[in-house]
Image (cartoon, grey):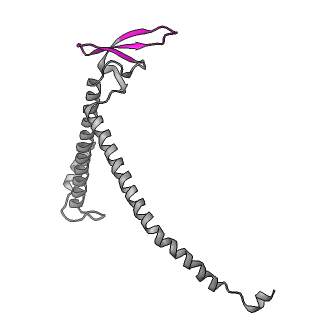
Amino acid sequence: MFWNLLADAAEGTEQTAPAGGIPSYVIWIVLGVILVLFIVYFFFSGRKNKQRRQEYAEQIDAIAPGNKVKTTGGICGIVTEVCDDNTIVLETGTDKSGKSYVKIDKECIYQTDAKGPMQIAREEAEARRKAEKAAKDAEKAAGKSKEEPAEAAQPEEAPAASEETSKETPEEKQD
């Protein structure tokens, strides 16, 4: 059925506008634009996903004894040992309930407080931006404090002007 529709459409194609509507070249232009948009979208989303995967891998490699982790199964614990065969030993439980040790694969780690090089660099850049913003704000505040003495003189003149506008008539003074 679909092939029949395509065959019918191919027989009726003309370079000029059909009786009821849009010229065929406009349809091809719209389809081309949509195709380009899809390609651009997948390109940029692929780059972002690649960056996330790389950051996750760096975080997993940065795990050391003492880091807190959560596994994909929901086990929370503290890393006590990092083994050479891509596994770690987790300490779970408390002193009251009793501690237990679990050996798991590093790839089962869902969340950790370990920081990889990319995350450290990003946090340093963010701290630098905040420091620069604070310095600019302090500079602006210092600039405003220099202008305040000049502004302080202006309000003193303003009440004199307002007294002129609110002068009472001689009749009101008598009342």
Question: Is 128 left or right of 91, judged from the image as shown?
Answer: left
Numbered marks: total:
0
Position of 154 relative to 22 (above/below): below
Q: Percent from the top left, x then y, of residue 125?
A: 29, 43
Q: Percent from the top left, x then y, of residue 33?
A: 24, 54
Quarter that holds the C terminus: bottom right
Q: Percent from the top left, x then y, of residue 148?
A: 47, 67
Q: Percent from the top left, x then y, of residue 25?
A: 20, 60
- 94 and 36: which is toward the camera: 94
Image quarter of residue 99: top left
Give the magenta-colored segment's residue range: 78-102
Q: Is residue 71 visible?
A: no
Furthest-right residue in view? Answer: 175
Q: Residue at x 24, y 39 (%)?
A: 46
Quarter that holds the N terminus: top left
Q: Is residue 41 magenta?
A: no
- 94 and 37: which is toward the camera: 94
Q: Residue at x 39, y 18 (%)?
A: 78
Q: Is residue 16 visible?
A: yes
Position of 96 relative to 143 (above/below): above
